[in-house]
Image: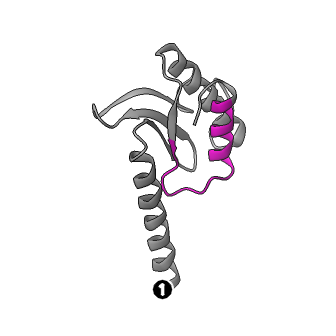
Amino acid sequence: MKLIKRAAKQKERRGFRVQNRVRSSGRLRLTVFRSNKHIYAQIVDDVAGQTLVSASTVEKSVLPEGHGSDCAAAAAVGKALASRAKEKGIVEIAFDRGSYRYHGRLAALADAAREAGLSF
């Protein structure tokens, strides 16, 4: 039981550390949420308090068929998000990974967004 509580506290601390560092950068923030079935990403303006661009594996235009829980799906979300952001004139962002480690699906999403033209 103590091991579970310690892991939860570490995850919470990691999330706070990342969010504080990203929010103090003054850039727009790319936030990511991943569930067991899907991955969601959005670009948020903290000053205005609104979401500017979003993409997820739930959308049929992003992922017409297949699983939404693998690295290929995360890369598709990264490309779609970057293309939508470039249409709105967004180029520089800060990557807010939250309490997730930069590994697997998150890394695939970030790499695809970088290749599609976003800079962070």
Q: Relative to the observer, which residue lies in front, 68 or 54?
A: 54
Residue 4 in the magenta stretch? The answer is no
> Does the magenta portion include 105?
yes
Q: Give the side of residue 109 with respect to residue 27, left or right.
A: right
| x 68%, y 41%: residue | 108
**Between 29 and 11, which is closer to the camera in this rendering?**
29
Which residue corresponds to the image point at 41% horizontal and 60% vertical from the top-left? 16
Magenta residue span: 95-114
Q: Position of residue 104 (x, y in %)?
A: 69, 50
Asked whether residue 19 is in view, the answer is yes
Q: Quadrant of the C terminus?
A: top right
Count of marks placed on residues: 1
Residue 67: % across, % down: 66, 37
Residue at which label 1 appears: 2
Q: Splitting the image into 4 quarters, where does residue 115 fall?
A: top right
x 66%, y 24%: residue = 116
Q: Amino acid at mark 1?
A: Lys
